[in-house]
Amino acid sequence: MSNYTTEAQLIQKFNALTEDWTRTETMLIKRELQKYLGNGKNKNTRLTLKLLHSLSGHARKTKGEVDRIGFKLLRYGIFYHKGVGKGRGIRSGKATPRPFLNDALERDIPKLIEIVSSNFADRAVNQARAQIK
């Protein structure tokens, strides 16, 4: 019975760490996006503020364990990220990418990888211990 408690504790710890990573990452992505904001007086800045407020992160669970992490934002965010808009297609040469998503995620994905790999390593060790006893 104590083995189940240990497994449950590991899942609880994993959920807490991944949810914390998601909250932190959402904040960091918003901070990256804020770098591209102007003085707030033009139309594009107002759209970007709407984009900033629409950005959210979520950790989804299946059977009580986080198995997916996602980020939600206005569709405009993808166009903004790629730097495209009216008269500025990707291949037009006029696009100015604003990689606010890539900058944050590429920097912080290794932290998430460490959380996930550590969780499953701990659980594998506990399974081995349970079988040895």
Image (spheres, rainbow, N blue to C red):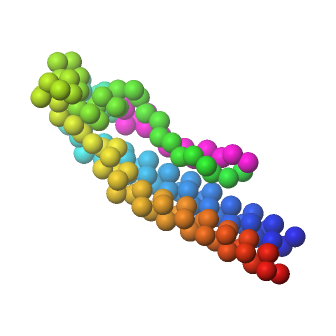
Q: Nearer the viewer, residue 11 or 73?
A: 11
x, y percent for residue 125:
67, 74
Who's the residue at 57% across and 46% down the image? 68
Quarter that holds the N terminus: bottom right
Q: Residue furthest left?
A: 93
Query: Please, is residue 39 above or below residue 27 in the view?
Result: above
Q: Left or right of 58: which side holds 5?
A: right
Q: Nearer the viewer, residue 36 or 108?
A: 108
Quarter that holds the C terminus: bottom right
Q: Nearer the viewer, residue 86 or 30?
A: 86
Magenta stretch: includes residue 129: no
Residue 33 visible in the displayed image: yes
Who's the residue at 62% across and 65% down the image? 120
Q: Left or right of 41: which side holds 54?
A: right
Q: Residue furthest bottom?
A: 133
x, y percent for residue 117:
54, 65
In which image quadrant can residue 45 be found? Answer: top left
Magenta stretch: includes residue 60: yes
Query: Please, is residue 2 above or below residue 100 in the view?
Result: below
Q: Left or right of 30: which side holds 111?
A: right
x, y percent for residue 52:
37, 37
Residue 31 visible in the displayed image: no
Q: Left or right of 20: which side holds 122?
A: right
Who's the residue at 14% across and 24% down the image? 92
Magenta stretch in the rendered image: 50-63
Who's the residue at 42% across and 61% down the image? 110
In which image quadrant can residue 44 be found? Answer: top left
Q: Residue furthest right?
A: 1
Number of labels in the image equals: 0
In which image quadrant can residue 49 be found? Answer: top left
x, y percent for residue 43:
24, 23
